[in-house]
Amino acid sequence: MTRVLHPPRASSTSSRAPEGYATLEFRRFFRHSPSEVWEAITNPEQVQQWFVTRTKTQARAGGRIELETGPERVRASGRILAWDPPRLYEFEWNTSARSPHFPGERSIIRWELTAGEGGTFVVLTHRDLTRRTAQVFGRGLPTFLDRLGALLDGTTMPDHVWATPP
């Protein structure tokens, strides 16, 4: 029996912080196919547009990923832990201490895509973050997911968080 998934009424976010570390989880529904969403989260040109982040990726499990993001040009790197198009993409987000907002992290980002009626359910999880960094990502990632949705829809993207005055 095939289970039919229906779009949630709204996106959701949750976080938890055991032992001084935090996990953020964001759930969204996009009215686009899993392959379209996959392309938007893995293609460096598209990632640059919605996430304002430069990426270099060896597109395979075990490959390397390098990212540069933010006004402070924070650099992250790591291994791709899972690469199963268009369903699962997981990679390390390792940074060196560079600023008060980014004291150095060894965390994991995981994208899970599930086909649903009329589109794709996305669960984005960022785990093993320090609490301080989780606060920064917790404020910013919803806006970036809004930008991802706008890119997929072909509409004007909202300003990214670095363009928003304090």
Image (cartoon, grey):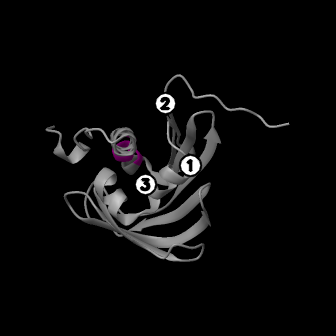
The image shows residue 66, relative to residue 10, as above or below, that is below
Residue receiving disc 1: 34
Kindly indicate the quadrant of the structure image that contains residue 85: bottom right
Residues packed near mark 1 inside 10 Å, few (<14), some (14 to 19) or many (20 plus) = many
User: Which comes before the other along the chain, label 2 or label 1?
Assistant: 2
Residues packed near mark 3 inside 10 Å, few (<14), some (14 to 19) or many (20 plus) = many
**Residue at 37% across / 65% down in the picture?**
44
In the image, residue 12 lies in the stretch drawn in magenta: no
Q: CA distance from mark 3 to mark 2?
A: 18 Å
* 77 and 8: which is toward the camera: 8
Residues packed near mark 2 inside 10 Å, few (<14), some (14 to 19) or many (20 plus) = some
User: Can you tell which mark lies on residue 40?
Assistant: 3
* 15 and 58: which is toward the camera: 58
Instruction: Name the amino acid type tagged 2.
Output: Ser
Q: CA distance from mark 2 to mark 1?
A: 17 Å
* 117 and 135: which is toward the camera: 117
Q: In this image, 125 relative to 133: left or right?
A: right
Q: Nearer the viewer, mark 2 or mark 1?
A: 1
User: Which comes before the other along the chain, label 1 or label 3?
Assistant: 1
Q: Position of residue 47 (x, y in %)?
A: 36, 58
Residue receiving disc 2: 11
Which element carries disc 2, helix, strand or loop?
loop
In the image, the segment drawn in magenta is 134-138
